């Protein structure tokens, strides 16, 4: 796929590739205990300072979600590799937002736009998503985005939920 695409504009947000000015917010995202409640724990600020490149998370499929010129979250679109048989090889959606941006519908708005872009790049392909079933906000978001349960399984000492969204032609 061609990367980066032109920035994707929604009603309130812009989805774009990362830039050097996102580094502080990106480190804040990865160091946040709240963000990592269901994701295996945050990273230490010292490690992040050492290991985060000048332009963080710049790879095909990594969208920065921008509100009024500042990063509020990241959307990750990848091919699932090591995963459940039903998910291997499929497009996989992930999302992380800064806690101060929760509760405004930004994640839903950004993910819907990313899925629309993905449908244009890979018409008809389904998308999978994995989240802990205890992660209520993420489960609600998955349902809103049209993901339906494939299976639940135990991993990383917790129940995980694998959902799938059927492929759609680009609108
Ligand atoms: C998962 C996560 C992205 C959900 O964020 P969120 O802000 O709760 O999600 P949404 O964008 O769907 O917004 C939720 C709420 O905003 C409210 N809202 C307020 N204004 C709104 C508006 N203008 N439009 C839509 N919704 C609005 C909605 O009522 C909605 O609440 P509901 O789900 O109770 O109906 C966030 O909790 C997060 O980043 N968690 C840490 C990372 C993580 O666990 N990721 C999952 C693994 S991939």
Image: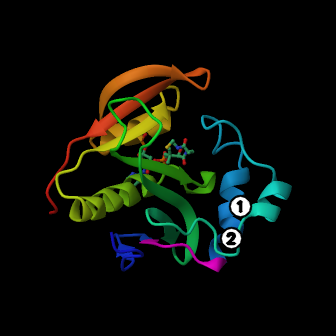
Q: Say whether residue 141 is visible.
A: yes
Quarter occupied by residue 73: bottom right
Q: Residues within 10 Å of mark 2 (few under 14, many from 20)?
A: many
Q: Position of residue 26 (x, y in %)?
A: 65, 63
Quarter occupied by residue 52: bottom right
Residue at point 49% right, 73% down? Answer: 17
Residue bounds of the magenta highlight: 15-20
Q: Position of residue 81 (x, y in %)?
A: 44, 42
Residue at point 70% right, 39% down? Answer: 41
Answer left or right for 166 relative to 52. Answer: left
The residue nearer to you, when weighing 45 against 73, is 45
Q: Is residue 134 above or below residue 26?
A: above
Q: Is residue 76 above or below residue 56?
A: above
Q: Position of residue 13 (x, y in %)?
A: 43, 70
Q: Which residue is mark 2?
A: 23
The residue nearer to you, when weighing 131 against 86, is 86
Q: Residues within 10 Å of mark 1 (few under 14, many from 20)?
A: many
Answer left or right for 27 relative to 160. Answer: right
Residue at point 33% right, 44% down? Answer: 90
- Magenta-span inclusion, residue 115: no
The answer to whether mark 1 and mark 2 are in CB contact below 8 A is yes
* Disc 1 to disc 2, C-alpha distance: 6 Å
Quarter of the rendering occupied by the N terminus: bottom left
Label 2 near ligand 1 (CB < 8 Å): no
Q: Is residue 138 above or below residue 32?
A: above
SS at circle 2: helix
The residue nearer to you, when weighing 81 against 125, is 81
Q: Position of residue 48 (x, y in %)?
A: 77, 58
Label 1 near ligand 1 (CB < 8 Å): no
Q: Which residue is mark 1?
A: 27
Q: Is residue 112 above or below residue 71?
A: above
Given the current orientation, which residue lies at the most extreme right position? Answer: 46
């Amino acid at each position: 796929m061609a990367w980066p695409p032109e920035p994707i504009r929604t009603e309130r947000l812009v989805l774009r590739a990362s830039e050097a000015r996102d580094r502080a917010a990106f480190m804040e995202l990865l160091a946040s205990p709240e963000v990592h409640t269901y994701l295996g724990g945050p990273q230490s600020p010292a490690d992040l300072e050492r290991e985060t490149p000048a332009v963080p998370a710049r790879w095909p499929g990594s969208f920065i979600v921008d509100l009024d010129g500042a990063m509020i979250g990241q959307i990750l679109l990848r091919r699932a590799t090591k995963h459940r048989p039903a998910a291997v090889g499929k497009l996989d959606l992930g999302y992380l937002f800064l806690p101060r941006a929760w509760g405004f519908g930004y994640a839903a708005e950004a993910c819907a736009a990313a899925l629309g872009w993905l449908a244009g790049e890979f018409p008809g392909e389904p998308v999978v998503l994995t989240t802990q079933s205890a992660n209520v906000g993420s489960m609600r978001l998955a349902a809103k985005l049209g993901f339906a349960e494939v299976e639940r399984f135990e991993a990383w000492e917790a129940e995980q939920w694998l959902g799938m969204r059927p492929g759609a032609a680009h609108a």
